[in-house]
Image (spheres, rainbow, N blue to C red):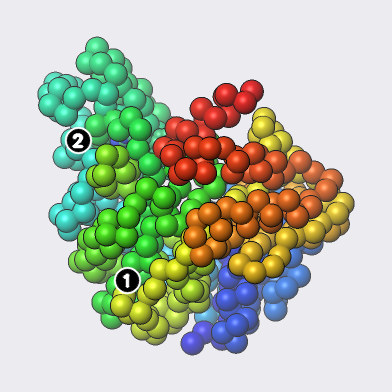
Amino acid sequence: MFDKVLIANRGEIALRIHRACQEMGIATVAVHSTADEHAMHVRLANECVCIGPPSSQDSYLNIPAIISAAEITGADAIHPGYGFLSENDKFAEIIAEHKIEFIGPSAEHIRLMGDKISAKEVVKKLGIPVVPGSDGEVADITKAKKIADKIGYPVIVKAAAGGGGRGMKVVHSANELESAIQSCKKEAAASFGDAAVYLEKFLTLPRHIEFQVIADKYGNVCHLGERDCSLQRRHQKVLEEAPSPALNSDEQSRMGDIVSKAIKGLGYVGVGTIEFLYENGEFFFIEMNTRLQVEHPITEMITGIDIVREQIRIAAGLPLSFRQEDIKFSGHAIECRINAEDPFTFMPSPGKIKDYHAPGGLDVRVDSAIYSGYSIPPYYDSMIAKLIVHGKTRNECLMRLRRALAEYVIDGIKTTIPLHQSLIREPDFINGAYDIHWLENYLKSIK
Ligand code: MV4
Protein backbone atom coordinates (compact mmCIF):
# COMPACT_ATOMS: atom_id res chain seq x y z
CA MET A 1 0.00 0.00 0.00
CA PHE A 2 1.07 3.59 -0.54
CA ASP A 3 2.71 5.52 2.31
CA LYS A 4 1.84 8.95 0.98
CA VAL A 5 -0.74 10.24 -1.51
CA LEU A 6 -0.72 13.70 -3.09
CA ILE A 7 -4.22 15.10 -3.62
CA ALA A 8 -4.28 17.21 -6.80
CA ASN A 9 -7.56 18.96 -6.04
CA ARG A 10 -9.34 21.29 -3.61
CA GLY A 11 -12.60 21.68 -1.71
CA GLU A 12 -14.87 18.88 -0.57
CA ILE A 13 -13.33 16.21 -2.84
CA ALA A 14 -9.81 16.90 -1.56
CA LEU A 15 -11.17 16.39 1.94
CA ARG A 16 -13.09 13.24 0.88
CA ILE A 17 -9.85 11.73 -0.49
CA HIS A 18 -7.89 12.82 2.61
CA ARG A 19 -10.42 11.01 4.82
CA ALA A 20 -10.12 7.75 2.85
CA CYS A 21 -6.30 7.96 3.04
CA GLN A 22 -6.28 8.59 6.80
CA GLU A 23 -8.51 5.58 7.41
CA MET A 24 -6.04 3.47 5.41
CA GLY A 25 -3.02 4.77 7.36
CA ILE A 26 -1.81 6.78 4.36
CA ALA A 27 -0.26 10.25 4.81
CA THR A 28 -1.56 13.02 2.57
CA VAL A 29 -0.04 15.96 0.75
CA ALA A 30 -2.34 18.86 -0.10
CA VAL A 31 -1.42 21.15 -2.96
CA HIS A 32 -3.06 24.55 -3.06
CA SER A 33 -3.15 27.94 -4.73
CA THR A 34 -2.38 31.13 -2.81
CA ALA A 35 -6.17 31.68 -2.59
CA ASP A 36 -6.58 28.39 -0.67
CA GLU A 37 -4.06 28.90 2.14
CA HIS A 38 -6.85 28.65 4.73
CA ALA A 39 -8.78 25.85 3.06
CA MET A 40 -9.82 22.84 5.14
CA HIS A 41 -8.04 20.32 2.90
CA VAL A 42 -4.80 22.22 3.49
CA ARG A 43 -5.36 22.45 7.25
CA LEU A 44 -6.03 18.73 7.63
CA ALA A 45 -3.44 17.26 5.26
CA ASN A 46 -0.21 15.94 6.76
CA GLU A 47 1.83 18.19 4.46
CA CYS A 48 1.02 20.99 2.06
CA VAL A 49 2.69 22.65 -0.89
CA CYS A 50 1.67 25.96 -2.47
CA ILE A 51 1.71 25.39 -6.24
CA GLY A 52 0.79 28.79 -7.65
CA PRO A 53 -1.46 31.83 -7.87
CA PRO A 54 -5.30 31.71 -7.65
CA SER A 55 -5.99 31.07 -11.33
CA SER A 56 -6.62 27.30 -11.83
CA GLN A 57 -4.53 27.40 -14.99
CA ASP A 58 -1.47 28.35 -12.90
CA SER A 59 -2.15 26.11 -9.89
CA TYR A 60 -4.58 23.15 -9.95
CA LEU A 61 -3.92 22.66 -13.68
CA ASN A 62 -0.18 23.32 -13.44
CA ILE A 63 1.30 19.88 -14.19
CA PRO A 64 5.02 20.73 -13.60
CA ALA A 65 4.20 22.35 -10.23
CA ILE A 66 2.15 19.33 -9.12
CA ILE A 67 4.79 16.81 -10.21
CA SER A 68 7.45 18.87 -8.39
CA ALA A 69 5.33 18.87 -5.23
CA ALA A 70 5.03 15.07 -5.47
CA GLU A 71 8.80 14.68 -6.00
CA ILE A 72 9.72 17.04 -3.14
CA THR A 73 7.38 15.38 -0.65
CA GLY A 74 8.11 11.82 -1.83
CA ALA A 75 4.48 10.94 -2.61
CA ASP A 76 3.96 7.43 -4.07
CA ALA A 77 0.67 8.23 -5.78
CA ILE A 78 -1.48 11.14 -6.98
CA HIS A 79 -5.26 11.28 -6.71
CA PRO A 80 -6.73 13.79 -9.18
CA GLY A 81 -10.29 13.96 -7.76
CA TYR A 82 -12.82 15.21 -10.32
CA GLY A 83 -12.55 18.15 -12.74
CA PHE A 84 -9.11 19.81 -13.10
CA LEU A 85 -6.63 17.15 -14.35
CA SER A 86 -8.75 14.08 -13.61
CA GLU A 87 -9.42 13.23 -17.26
CA ASN A 88 -6.18 14.56 -18.72
CA ASP A 89 -4.39 11.64 -20.40
CA LYS A 90 -1.10 13.57 -20.61
CA PHE A 91 -1.14 14.10 -16.84
CA ALA A 92 -1.67 10.36 -16.25
CA GLU A 93 1.19 9.63 -18.67
CA ILE A 94 3.64 12.13 -17.10
CA ILE A 95 2.88 10.79 -13.62
CA ALA A 96 3.71 7.26 -14.79
CA GLU A 97 6.98 8.49 -16.35
CA HIS A 98 7.93 9.80 -12.91
CA LYS A 99 7.32 6.36 -11.37
CA ILE A 100 4.39 7.72 -9.39
CA GLU A 101 1.05 5.86 -9.40
CA PHE A 102 -1.91 7.70 -10.93
CA ILE A 103 -5.05 6.82 -8.95
CA GLY A 104 -7.22 6.39 -12.00
CA PRO A 105 -7.42 4.43 -15.25
CA SER A 106 -4.65 4.15 -17.85
CA ALA A 107 -3.80 7.17 -20.04
CA GLU A 108 -4.96 5.07 -23.04
CA HIS A 109 -8.43 4.51 -21.58
CA ILE A 110 -8.75 8.20 -20.66
CA ARG A 111 -7.83 9.16 -24.24
CA LEU A 112 -10.16 6.57 -25.78
CA MET A 113 -13.17 7.80 -23.79
CA GLY A 114 -12.23 11.48 -24.19
CA ASP A 115 -12.89 11.12 -27.91
CA LYS A 116 -16.67 10.60 -27.98
CA ILE A 117 -16.52 9.00 -31.45
CA SER A 118 -14.00 6.33 -30.48
CA ALA A 119 -15.80 5.81 -27.14
CA LYS A 120 -19.09 5.14 -28.89
CA GLU A 121 -17.50 2.86 -31.45
CA VAL A 122 -15.70 0.72 -28.88
CA VAL A 123 -18.60 0.34 -26.41
CA LYS A 124 -20.97 -0.52 -29.27
CA LYS A 125 -18.63 -3.38 -30.30
CA LEU A 126 -18.67 -4.54 -26.67
CA GLY A 127 -22.46 -4.88 -26.66
CA ILE A 128 -23.62 -1.60 -25.12
CA PRO A 129 -26.63 -0.03 -26.90
CA VAL A 130 -25.80 3.39 -28.39
CA VAL A 131 -27.92 6.23 -29.80
CA PRO A 132 -28.59 5.61 -33.52
CA GLY A 133 -26.51 7.93 -35.69
CA SER A 134 -23.48 8.24 -37.93
CA ASP A 135 -20.89 5.48 -37.58
CA GLY A 136 -18.04 7.80 -36.71
CA GLU A 137 -17.26 11.25 -37.99
CA VAL A 138 -19.46 13.09 -40.50
CA ALA A 139 -17.28 15.00 -42.93
CA ASP A 140 -19.31 14.90 -46.13
CA ILE A 141 -22.58 16.91 -46.10
CA THR A 142 -24.32 14.65 -48.68
CA LYS A 143 -23.61 11.60 -46.51
CA ALA A 144 -24.73 13.51 -43.42
CA LYS A 145 -28.08 14.33 -45.08
CA LYS A 146 -28.57 10.66 -45.97
CA ILE A 147 -27.88 9.53 -42.41
CA ALA A 148 -30.18 12.19 -40.93
CA ASP A 149 -33.00 11.24 -43.34
CA LYS A 150 -32.58 7.62 -42.34
CA ILE A 151 -32.63 8.15 -38.54
CA GLY A 152 -35.20 10.95 -38.82
CA TYR A 153 -35.25 14.51 -37.44
CA PRO A 154 -34.62 15.99 -34.97
CA VAL A 155 -30.92 15.05 -34.95
CA ILE A 156 -28.07 16.37 -32.83
CA VAL A 157 -24.59 17.31 -34.05
CA LYS A 158 -21.93 16.65 -31.41
CA ALA A 159 -18.21 17.39 -31.29
CA ALA A 160 -15.99 14.31 -30.85
CA ALA A 161 -13.88 16.25 -28.35
CA GLY A 162 -16.93 17.75 -26.59
CA GLY A 163 -18.92 16.10 -23.83
CA GLY A 164 -20.75 17.30 -20.78
CA GLY A 165 -22.96 19.45 -22.99
CA ARG A 166 -20.20 21.36 -24.78
CA GLY A 167 -20.16 21.55 -28.57
CA MET A 168 -23.67 20.30 -29.44
CA LYS A 169 -26.38 21.53 -31.83
CA VAL A 170 -29.92 20.25 -32.30
CA VAL A 171 -31.18 20.22 -35.90
CA HIS A 172 -34.90 20.08 -36.65
CA SER A 173 -34.93 19.85 -40.44
CA ALA A 174 -32.73 19.04 -43.44
CA ASN A 175 -32.32 22.68 -44.49
CA GLU A 176 -30.59 23.53 -41.16
CA LEU A 177 -28.20 20.58 -41.23
CA GLU A 178 -25.33 21.93 -43.30
CA SER A 179 -24.97 25.19 -41.39
CA ALA A 180 -25.27 23.35 -38.05
CA ILE A 181 -22.48 20.97 -39.00
CA GLN A 182 -20.32 23.84 -40.20
CA SER A 183 -20.79 25.96 -37.09
CA CYS A 184 -20.34 22.94 -34.79
CA LYS A 185 -17.06 22.06 -36.56
CA LYS A 186 -15.83 25.64 -36.33
CA GLU A 187 -16.66 25.85 -32.63
CA ALA A 188 -15.10 22.47 -31.94
CA ALA A 189 -11.87 23.41 -33.74
CA ALA A 190 -11.67 26.65 -31.75
CA SER A 191 -12.57 25.19 -28.32
CA PHE A 192 -10.95 21.76 -28.49
CA GLY A 193 -8.50 21.87 -31.41
CA ASP A 194 -10.41 19.00 -33.03
CA ALA A 195 -13.10 19.73 -35.64
CA ALA A 196 -14.52 16.19 -35.85
CA VAL A 197 -18.31 15.97 -35.32
CA TYR A 198 -20.84 13.13 -35.41
CA LEU A 199 -24.60 12.80 -35.74
CA GLU A 200 -27.18 11.23 -33.45
CA LYS A 201 -30.92 10.93 -33.31
CA PHE A 202 -32.03 13.65 -30.84
CA LEU A 203 -34.01 12.05 -28.02
CA THR A 204 -36.64 14.55 -26.92
CA LEU A 205 -37.64 13.51 -23.38
CA PRO A 206 -35.02 11.14 -21.96
CA ARG A 207 -33.72 10.71 -18.45
CA HIS A 208 -30.00 10.75 -17.68
CA ILE A 209 -29.13 7.47 -15.98
CA GLU A 210 -25.53 6.47 -15.33
CA PHE A 211 -23.98 3.21 -14.10
CA GLN A 212 -21.05 3.11 -11.69
CA VAL A 213 -18.44 0.49 -12.48
CA ILE A 214 -15.28 -0.55 -10.70
CA ALA A 215 -12.51 -2.83 -11.97
CA ASP A 216 -9.22 -4.06 -10.52
CA LYS A 217 -5.96 -5.02 -12.28
CA TYR A 218 -6.93 -8.72 -12.32
CA GLY A 219 -10.01 -8.57 -14.55
CA ASN A 220 -12.55 -8.43 -11.71
CA VAL A 221 -15.35 -6.03 -12.62
CA CYS A 222 -18.46 -5.03 -10.64
CA HIS A 223 -21.22 -2.56 -11.25
CA LEU A 224 -22.54 -0.57 -8.30
CA GLY A 225 -25.93 0.19 -9.80
CA GLU A 226 -27.19 3.39 -11.34
CA ARG A 227 -27.78 7.03 -10.48
CA ASP A 228 -30.50 9.21 -11.94
CA CYS A 229 -28.98 12.60 -12.76
CA SER A 230 -31.79 14.04 -14.86
CA LEU A 231 -32.18 17.15 -12.71
CA GLN A 232 -29.73 19.51 -14.35
CA ARG A 233 -29.49 23.19 -15.21
CA ARG A 234 -27.24 24.23 -18.08
CA HIS A 235 -25.58 20.80 -17.97
CA GLN A 236 -24.82 21.18 -14.26
CA LYS A 237 -26.35 18.51 -12.07
CA VAL A 238 -28.42 19.91 -9.21
CA LEU A 239 -29.75 16.79 -7.42
CA GLU A 240 -29.03 13.10 -8.00
CA GLU A 241 -30.66 9.93 -6.70
CA ALA A 242 -29.92 6.22 -6.52
CA PRO A 243 -31.56 4.01 -7.54
CA SER A 244 -33.40 5.72 -10.40
CA PRO A 245 -37.14 6.06 -9.67
CA ALA A 246 -37.71 5.09 -13.32
CA LEU A 247 -36.11 1.62 -13.26
CA ASN A 248 -37.16 -1.67 -11.73
CA SER A 249 -34.53 -3.97 -10.26
CA ASP A 250 -34.66 -6.26 -13.34
CA GLU A 251 -33.75 -3.38 -15.65
CA GLN A 252 -31.01 -2.40 -13.21
CA SER A 253 -29.38 -5.81 -13.07
CA ARG A 254 -29.81 -6.49 -16.79
CA MET A 255 -28.12 -3.20 -17.73
CA GLY A 256 -25.54 -3.61 -14.95
CA ASP A 257 -24.50 -6.97 -16.38
CA ILE A 258 -24.20 -5.57 -19.92
CA VAL A 259 -22.06 -2.72 -18.62
CA SER A 260 -19.82 -4.99 -16.50
CA LYS A 261 -19.16 -7.33 -19.45
CA ALA A 262 -18.21 -4.40 -21.67
CA ILE A 263 -15.85 -2.93 -19.06
CA LYS A 264 -14.18 -6.31 -18.69
CA GLY A 265 -13.82 -6.54 -22.48
CA LEU A 266 -12.25 -3.09 -22.52
CA GLY A 267 -9.62 -4.13 -19.98
CA TYR A 268 -10.54 -1.01 -18.03
CA VAL A 269 -9.02 -0.55 -14.55
CA GLY A 270 -10.34 1.82 -11.89
CA VAL A 271 -13.70 3.49 -11.32
CA GLY A 272 -15.82 4.69 -14.21
CA THR A 273 -19.28 5.87 -15.10
CA ILE A 274 -21.23 4.88 -18.19
CA GLU A 275 -23.80 7.55 -19.06
CA PHE A 276 -27.05 6.67 -20.78
CA LEU A 277 -30.09 8.45 -22.03
CA TYR A 278 -33.14 6.39 -21.03
CA GLU A 279 -36.37 6.81 -22.98
CA ASN A 280 -39.42 4.54 -23.36
CA GLY A 281 -37.75 1.69 -21.52
CA GLU A 282 -34.60 1.77 -23.67
CA PHE A 283 -31.00 2.69 -22.82
CA PHE A 284 -28.71 4.58 -25.19
CA PHE A 285 -25.04 5.11 -24.32
CA ILE A 286 -23.80 8.69 -24.67
CA GLU A 287 -20.46 9.02 -22.82
CA MET A 288 -18.13 7.34 -20.36
CA ASN A 289 -16.47 9.29 -17.54
CA THR A 290 -13.12 7.92 -16.44
CA ARG A 291 -13.01 9.73 -13.08
CA LEU A 292 -14.51 9.61 -9.61
CA GLN A 293 -17.75 11.62 -9.84
CA VAL A 294 -19.23 14.33 -7.64
CA GLU A 295 -22.31 12.16 -6.99
CA HIS A 296 -20.41 8.98 -5.96
CA PRO A 297 -21.67 9.23 -2.33
CA ILE A 298 -25.24 8.21 -3.20
CA THR A 299 -23.84 4.95 -4.58
CA GLU A 300 -21.79 4.53 -1.40
CA MET A 301 -24.94 5.05 0.68
CA ILE A 302 -26.93 2.29 -1.07
CA THR A 303 -24.05 -0.21 -1.33
CA GLY A 304 -22.01 0.48 1.81
CA ILE A 305 -18.87 0.50 -0.37
CA ASP A 306 -16.20 3.18 0.14
CA ILE A 307 -15.50 3.94 -3.53
CA VAL A 308 -12.45 6.13 -2.86
CA ARG A 309 -10.87 3.48 -0.62
CA GLU A 310 -11.42 0.86 -3.35
CA GLN A 311 -9.98 3.24 -5.94
CA ILE A 312 -6.78 3.62 -3.89
CA ARG A 313 -6.58 -0.15 -3.31
CA ILE A 314 -6.94 -0.82 -7.04
CA ALA A 315 -4.14 1.63 -7.90
CA ALA A 316 -1.92 -0.08 -5.30
CA GLY A 317 -2.48 -3.41 -7.04
CA LEU A 318 -4.93 -4.97 -4.59
CA PRO A 319 -7.96 -6.94 -5.80
CA LEU A 320 -11.53 -5.65 -5.34
CA SER A 321 -12.61 -6.42 -1.78
CA PHE A 322 -16.01 -7.78 -2.95
CA ARG A 323 -17.65 -9.70 -5.80
CA GLN A 324 -20.86 -8.77 -7.60
CA GLU A 325 -22.84 -11.32 -5.54
CA ASP A 326 -21.68 -9.62 -2.32
CA ILE A 327 -23.18 -6.28 -3.29
CA LYS A 328 -26.61 -5.69 -1.78
CA PHE A 329 -28.47 -2.62 -2.93
CA SER A 330 -30.17 -1.22 0.11
CA GLY A 331 -32.68 1.63 0.29
CA HIS A 332 -32.57 4.97 -1.45
CA ALA A 333 -30.15 7.92 -1.43
CA ILE A 334 -30.38 11.51 -2.68
CA GLU A 335 -27.67 14.14 -3.01
CA CYS A 336 -28.34 17.88 -3.11
CA ARG A 337 -25.52 19.97 -4.51
CA ILE A 338 -25.28 23.17 -2.51
CA ASN A 339 -23.74 26.05 -4.39
CA ALA A 340 -22.67 29.51 -3.22
CA GLU A 341 -25.19 31.12 -5.57
CA ASP A 342 -28.48 32.94 -5.50
CA PRO A 343 -30.99 30.03 -5.34
CA PHE A 344 -33.12 31.34 -8.20
CA THR A 345 -30.90 33.58 -10.39
CA PHE A 346 -27.78 31.42 -9.87
CA MET A 347 -25.56 34.50 -9.57
CA PRO A 348 -22.35 33.43 -7.77
CA SER A 349 -22.20 34.50 -4.12
CA PRO A 350 -18.66 34.06 -2.80
CA GLY A 351 -17.69 35.62 0.55
CA LYS A 352 -17.32 34.94 4.24
CA ILE A 353 -19.42 32.32 6.03
CA LYS A 354 -20.53 34.00 9.25
CA ASP A 355 -22.41 31.13 10.84
CA TYR A 356 -22.41 27.46 9.96
CA HIS A 357 -24.39 24.51 11.24
CA ALA A 358 -24.51 21.25 9.28
CA PRO A 359 -27.38 18.79 9.72
CA GLY A 360 -26.70 15.35 11.17
CA GLY A 361 -28.45 12.31 12.54
CA LEU A 362 -29.09 8.84 11.17
CA ASP A 363 -28.33 8.40 7.47
CA VAL A 364 -27.39 12.05 6.90
CA ARG A 365 -23.99 12.84 5.37
CA VAL A 366 -22.49 16.21 4.54
CA ASP A 367 -19.42 16.31 2.28
CA SER A 368 -18.00 19.81 2.51
CA ALA A 369 -14.77 21.63 3.29
CA ILE A 370 -16.39 24.85 4.51
CA TYR A 371 -16.49 26.10 8.12
CA SER A 372 -17.63 29.07 10.15
CA GLY A 373 -15.36 32.02 9.35
CA TYR A 374 -14.17 30.57 6.04
CA SER A 375 -14.14 32.86 3.00
CA ILE A 376 -15.24 31.22 -0.23
CA PRO A 377 -12.84 32.45 -2.89
CA PRO A 378 -14.36 33.70 -6.16
CA TYR A 379 -11.99 31.81 -8.48
CA TYR A 380 -13.39 28.28 -8.49
CA ASP A 381 -16.54 26.21 -8.92
CA SER A 382 -19.40 27.42 -6.73
CA MET A 383 -20.30 24.02 -5.23
CA ILE A 384 -19.51 24.29 -1.50
CA ALA A 385 -21.29 21.27 -0.01
CA LYS A 386 -23.14 18.08 -0.81
CA LEU A 387 -25.97 16.95 1.43
CA ILE A 388 -26.48 13.23 1.05
CA VAL A 389 -29.38 11.46 2.71
CA HIS A 390 -30.31 7.79 2.83
CA GLY A 391 -33.57 6.06 3.75
CA LYS A 392 -34.98 2.54 3.66
CA THR A 393 -37.45 3.71 1.01
CA ARG A 394 -37.54 6.70 -1.34
CA ASN A 395 -40.27 8.24 0.76
CA GLU A 396 -38.28 7.87 3.97
CA CYS A 397 -35.31 9.41 2.15
CA LEU A 398 -37.45 12.37 1.04
CA MET A 399 -38.82 13.02 4.53
CA ARG A 400 -35.31 12.86 5.98
CA LEU A 401 -34.01 15.21 3.27
CA ARG A 402 -36.72 17.76 4.14
CA ARG A 403 -35.70 17.57 7.77
CA ALA A 404 -31.97 17.86 7.01
CA LEU A 405 -32.42 20.83 4.65
CA ALA A 406 -34.45 22.60 7.33
CA GLU A 407 -31.60 22.16 9.83
CA TYR A 408 -28.85 23.40 7.52
CA VAL A 409 -27.55 26.90 8.39
CA ILE A 410 -25.04 28.67 6.11
CA ASP A 411 -25.12 32.40 6.88
CA GLY A 412 -23.25 35.27 5.26
CA ILE A 413 -23.61 34.10 1.66
CA LYS A 414 -26.46 33.00 -0.58
CA THR A 415 -26.80 29.27 -1.23
CA THR A 416 -29.04 26.99 -3.28
CA ILE A 417 -30.56 25.40 -0.14
CA PRO A 418 -33.91 27.22 -0.69
CA LEU A 419 -34.06 25.86 -4.25
CA HIS A 420 -33.72 22.30 -2.93
CA GLN A 421 -36.36 22.98 -0.28
CA SER A 422 -38.90 23.92 -2.93
CA LEU A 423 -37.78 21.36 -5.51
CA ILE A 424 -38.34 18.38 -3.24
CA ARG A 425 -41.89 19.54 -2.50
CA GLU A 426 -42.90 19.50 -6.17
CA PRO A 427 -45.40 16.73 -6.98
CA ASP A 428 -43.47 15.72 -10.14
CA PHE A 429 -40.32 15.30 -8.10
CA ILE A 430 -42.12 13.42 -5.35
CA ASN A 431 -43.56 11.10 -8.02
CA GLY A 432 -40.18 10.70 -9.71
CA ALA A 433 -41.85 11.94 -12.91
CA TYR A 434 -39.09 14.08 -14.41
CA ASP A 435 -36.78 14.06 -17.45
CA ILE A 436 -33.65 16.04 -18.40
CA HIS A 437 -35.68 19.14 -19.29
CA TRP A 438 -37.96 19.16 -16.24
CA LEU A 439 -35.78 21.35 -13.98
CA GLU A 440 -35.27 24.14 -16.51
CA ASN A 441 -39.03 24.22 -17.18
CA TYR A 442 -39.73 24.28 -13.46
CA LEU A 443 -37.32 27.21 -12.96
CA LYS A 444 -39.05 29.11 -15.77
CA SER A 445 -42.47 28.40 -14.22
CA ILE A 446 -41.57 29.89 -10.83
CA LYS A 447 -39.93 33.09 -12.25
C1 MV4 B 1 -28.24 14.07 -26.19
C2 MV4 B 1 -29.56 14.54 -25.94
C3 MV4 B 1 -30.57 14.06 -26.74
N1 MV4 B 1 -30.29 13.19 -27.74
N2 MV4 B 1 -28.03 13.21 -27.19
C4 MV4 B 1 -26.04 16.80 -22.97
C5 MV4 B 1 -24.78 16.56 -22.25
C6 MV4 B 1 -24.10 15.44 -22.91
N3 MV4 B 1 -23.60 14.53 -21.92
C7 MV4 B 1 -25.11 14.81 -23.78
N4 MV4 B 1 -26.28 15.66 -23.75
C8 MV4 B 1 -27.39 15.34 -24.43
N5 MV4 B 1 -27.22 14.46 -25.44
C9 MV4 B 1 -29.03 12.80 -27.95
N6 MV4 B 1 -28.79 11.93 -28.95
C10 MV4 B 1 -29.76 15.44 -24.89
C11 MV4 B 1 -28.68 15.86 -24.13
C12 MV4 B 1 -28.98 16.76 -23.06
C13 MV4 B 1 -28.88 16.37 -21.73
C14 MV4 B 1 -28.41 15.13 -21.39
C15 MV4 B 1 -28.29 14.75 -20.07
C16 MV4 B 1 -28.68 15.63 -19.07
C17 MV4 B 1 -29.16 16.88 -19.38
C18 MV4 B 1 -29.25 17.27 -20.70
C19 MV4 B 1 -29.76 18.53 -21.02
C20 MV4 B 1 -29.84 18.90 -22.32
C21 MV4 B 1 -29.45 18.02 -23.35
Mark 1 neighbour class, 10 Å CA radius: few under 14, some 14 to 19, many 20 or more: many
In terms of image quadrants, where is residue 364?
Answer: bottom right
Tag 1 and tag 2, C-beta contact below 8 Å: no
Q: Is residue 60 above or below residue 29?
A: above
Q: Is mark 1 within 8 Å of ligand 1?
A: no
Residue 105 shows in this picture? no
Q: Quadrant of ligand 1?
A: top left
Residue 255 vs 349, above or below: the answer is: below
Q: Is residue 181 left or right of residue 376?
A: left
Q: Which residue is mark 2?
A: 133
Rendered image: mark on residue 135: none
Work out whether residue 109 can be spotted.
yes
Q: CB of residue at label 2: within 8 Å of ligand 1?
A: yes
Residue 311 horizontal/vertical position (percent): 45, 73
Q: Nearer the viewer, residue 125 or 4?
A: 125
Q: Residue at x 27, y 51 (%)?
A: 119
- State the image quarter where residue 23 is shown: bottom right
Query: Looking at the rendered structure, which numbered label has been put on residue 222?
Result: 1
Q: Is residue 402 above or below residue 280?
A: below
Looking at the rendered structure, the kind of residue marked 1 is Cys
* Residue that sits furthest to the top in the current view: 175
Is residue 38 found left or right of 264 in the rendered image?
A: right
Observer-nearest of 299 and 131: 299
**Sequence order check: which comes first, mark 1 or mark 2?**
2
Residue 143, percent across and down? 13, 26
Residue at 59%, 60% (x, y): give it: 389
**Percent x, y for residue 78?**
52, 71
As measured in the structure, the alpha-carbon distance from the residue carrying label 1 to the one carrying label 2 is 29 Å
Quadrant in which the C terminus appears? top right
Say which of 110 and 327 sits in front.
327
